[in-house]
Amino acid sequence: MNLFSYYRLLFSAFFLTCSLSTSLFAKDYYFHPRLGSDARSGLTAEEAFQHLSKIQSLELKPGDRILLASGEEFKGSILIDKIKGTKENPLLIQSYGDSDIPFALINAAGEEAGVLIQNSAFIQVKNLRIQANGKGKTERSLPMRVGVLVRSTQGNSTSNIVLDKLQIEQVFYESSGFQRGADEVKTANGTQKYGWGIRLIANGQDQEIEQVEIKNCQIRNLAHTGIKLTGNNQQSIRNISITGNQVEQVGGPGIQMSGVKFVYVADNLVSHSGSNDDSRKWGRGSGLWTWGSSMVMIEKNQFLYANGPGDSAGAHIDFNCDNIILQYNLSAYNAGGFCEILGNNYNCAYRYNISVNDGHRVKGENGAFQEGKTLWLSGYQGGKKPRKGPINSYIYNNTIYVGEDIVSKIAIDNRSKGVLIANNIFHIEGKSQLVAGDQYKPDDESSRALEDVFFKSNLFLHAENWPKQALIQPERFQIGNVEFINPGGMELKDYIPQKSNLLKGIAIPFLPSDQFGLVNGMDLEHDILGNPLGENPGMGAIKLIEKP
């Protein structure tokens, strides 16, 4: 054995010994709200602590576990501040016991958060229920109420956080009966105090949050956004994974992110965002939207039944973003629409998605101040800046179904530069209409020509499916009915086409002025159902595999 190998082996043995030592000396701290006492050791279930506030006096070390009795209700909140676990030995917070109700409940009424993690690393929170329904018995003034709040303060970072199998519901800042007023829903994001599901906040200078997993959580019935990431203009929140969650009946958007980079959003169900069934809810929100964000992949999600008088698309790309990709998603019955890309956005794409009856909202009805739209490209980048872009928008191989009782509306800002619309199926059974973009003030309706347009190889059910007044018009298109298996259905397989003679597509090119294309390339290996695409991608989100 040479000297280098000897020292490497010695170092590995030392590292393993340290890791095992940390694990061996880690402690379990038990909590029971009825049978516990803060005067006990907390080191066994029989010697459990009682109150969550006891956690702040513990000297927590890597590998320690905070264990809450399942089936029990704890009042208050958990604060984890400047606690550092390690990769091998994270700090774990979870339920324990064999109750018929598997999770412990944290009742955080009157608190800022049910669980607050700040300036900490390698923390895992699992298998808990969290509620925070109003002010409780306190009149403290707080900025918000949140199920789980992860944040960093100036000069600090928070990293390597896992939130897994959490049930977060009934989170409201105000107590039942509070009325927001009719104008609040018209403001850009709401101006009053709200309850939120999960929030990541690093929006000041010299702050950052990195490496966070939010997975397998159920978030429902709260005042505003289900999962919200708020970074700064340096995109201080990075490397985030949001997977396998259910977000339902929230008063704002399902998932929203600002000032982030490198985010993966997959296999989530978002349903009835923008809910207004409680006067404390905002009553408006897309299933998902991004702002000021980069490198975000959004795939294999379901965005359903978004409600609200404005916005409230299945998933939309707000301004100041780049490289946002939406693929393999089901978007259905969302009031605001299917495809929405606002201003100062670069190299964003909707591809291989299925849209069902999106954009059914009618301006002027039931308080709506924006039209719902099948497709909307807008140069809006804030009320004080001139219209710009979007630039290099790729919209291809989507299947779009609109039933006969809905008017399909299109809006394309004449400042859009670089637009590719190809290999889409526009199965629009009723009328189509050109409308002005209406994000707080209408888009410019002058007849300025768009630059770098590729609008070819699309299939329309009728010749009238694309408004003749639109600035861009389709070329080399087909007209016909591919006879979906079950048009109007809510399963992906309902949109398997039956007529192969209408389904020959083209390879997707780069736009003329675009040297970059899309993150991970223009070509995909399979369609939304997993069928291999081969050399010809075909039309729509599903490639017909002909039986031999």
Image (cartoon, rainbow, N blue to C red):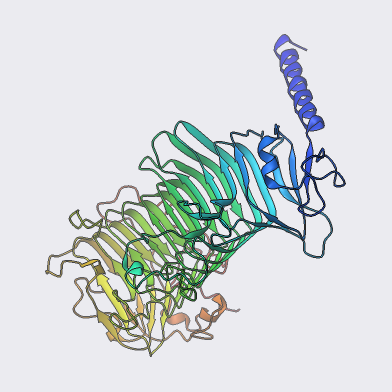
Between 21 and 155, the one nearer to me in the picture: 155
User: Where in the figure is residue 181, as x and y percent of width and height?
Assistant: 36, 71
Locate residue 539 relative to residue 59 in the image: left or right: left
Question: Residue farthest to the right?
Answer: 46
Residue located at (79% from left, 36% from top): 27
Locate residue 134 relative to residue 475 in the image: left or right: right
On-image quarter of the N terminus: top right
Between 67 and 544, the one nearer to me in the picture: 67
User: Where in the figure is residue 455, as x and y percent of width and height?
Assistant: 28, 68
Q: Is residue 393 above or below residue 261?
A: below
Between 125 and 520, the one nearer to me in the picture: 125
Can residue 520 be seen at all in this image of the molecule? no
Locate residue 473 relative to residue 110 in the image: left or right: left
Residue located at (32% from left, 87% from top): 462
On-image quarter of the C terminus: bottom right
**Image quadrant assignment for residue 62:** top right
Q: Is residue 229 above or below residue 500?
A: above
**Image quadrant assignment for residue 372:** bottom left
User: Where in the figure is residue 184, as x and y percent of width and height?
Assistant: 35, 67
